[in-house]
Image: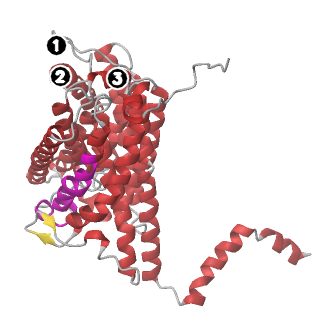
Amino acid sequence: MLMRTARRVVKPGVLVILIVMALPAVAGEATAETNAVAIDTVWTLIAAFLVFFMQPGFAMVEVGFTRAKNASNILMKNLMDFCVGSIAFWLIGFGIMFGADKLGLFGTNGFFLSAANPSTGEGLWQFAFWMFQVVFAATAATIVSGAMAERTRFPAYLFYSFFICALIYPVVGHWIWGNGWLAAKGFIDFAGSTVVHSVGGWAALAGAMLLGPRLGKYNKDGTSNAIPGHNIPLAALGVFILWFGWFGFNAGSTTSGTNLSIATIAVTTNLAAAAAAITAMFTAWVRFGKPDTSMALNGALAGLVGITAACACVSPLSAIIIGAVAGALVVFSVELIDKVLHIDDPVGAISVHGVCGAWGTLSVGLFAQSLYGESSGVGAVNGLFFGGGLSQFFTQLTGVVSVFIWVFGASLGLFYVIKKTIGLRASDEEQLKGLDISEHGMESYAGFQIFTTE
């Protein structure tokens, strides 16, 4: 009777676990080192899958904040920038970013994933690392889509998605994450406030400036007209998906499941987003008389972008402050870019990713603490507010300015070439009709008209 009772307790799931645990005894004795490699590989891949899930998050945000007649066009862009970006990063981008250093500026080998040998442990790790990095490259590309939404020709989008992932983004990545010249200076950007988000934001700025505003956005007297998005619930869903994926984005950047600082990184990431959403809500409430939903949603994203550089080297309290500043900053930035600079950014991508990415990068020089940096592998770095002086802040500032000059200049050149060759802007007629019909020959919300066969 006791034996039967015990057998009932051993459920199929538990049995599978016991078999898996016994495998090393059959295939060869497991060691602490082999276990660590396995855990790190699995963690890095899971984090990569979480970051990949941010692609539909960006798609939902952009669709929700724009008009119904352009929804399919935006979905196609978010699909294709990942597809095109994956090929570009495999061909060229990964080698430029992580290949052997040349003058601290770019890598010179590892193209076509040639260094990834599937017969060795190190080679297999290269596959996992590439997978984690390609989803970051695609994120930088997809940021541009929102700022240029509703008036960009689809072929132009495919063209610039390729070059952002093949060249513009990887060069910055090499400077900072590929042992380039900024890394040598001690520049810190743990998960990509500058490498990913500001790159996307500054490229978006160049594109939106050269592209021009949507029809009807600005009046002759310079005043701005609001063009409301058609589905705020979709935008909210996108923000929650992005928030979820961001835990892979930030904590996954340890590329090590055995590095227990993933716990503190998850906490700082969450607190910064929460604080930013609150301050964005209250800032908009004071500025506009109502707690604007779209501003609160962008506030959460601003906090996530802002904490991305510093998530591994600041305390929870510092994360709240960084996020709170980002939340207020994004409201003022959106207003400045729209009403003063007259740059049409339908989703606020320039403010969320470019401006708040810069703020988050600079915040490392103010709030970094060696207590947190040492445990995560960032190093014993203290910012200004913790006795470190201004040295780290100026290093961060150097990186922010340098990346802006490269990305904005290169993107402006790229968009200018596109404009003069294949064409960048959709015609007035195409914009009025909607890019879903003019570019893709379909509607996102069809089926409302009743047809009869009589």
Name the spot of residue 173 as percent of width and height, x first. Answer: 21, 58
Residue linked to disc 3: 282
Q: Quadrant of the N terminus?
A: bottom right
Question: Is 222 left, or right, of 299 in this rendering?
Answer: left
> What's the residue at 45%, 57% (across, down)?
49
In the rendered structure, which amino acid carries the disc numbered 3?
Answer: Phe
Residue sitting at 28 percent across and 14 percent down? Answer: 225
Question: What residue does disc 1 label?
Answer: 222
Secondary structure of the residue carrying numbered label 1:
loop
- Specify start and end residues of the magenta stretch as a single range: 159-184
Q: Earlier in the sequence, mark 1 or mark 3?
A: 1
- 46 sits left or right of 422 in the view: right
Marks 2 and 1: in contact by CB < 8 Å? Answer: yes
**Residue 118 percent across, percent down from the top left:** 40, 79
Q: Residue at x 23, y 67 (%)?
A: 95
Residue type, mark 2 in image: His
The kind of residue tagged 1 is Gly
Which residue in the structure is indicated by mark 2?
342
Query: Which label's residue is closer to the chain start, 1 or 2?
Result: 1
Disc number lying in front (3 or 2): 2
Relative to 141, residue 224 above or below: above
**Label 3 secondary element:** helix
Residue reaching furthest to the front: 454
- Between the C-alphas of marks 1 and 2, the distance is 8 Å
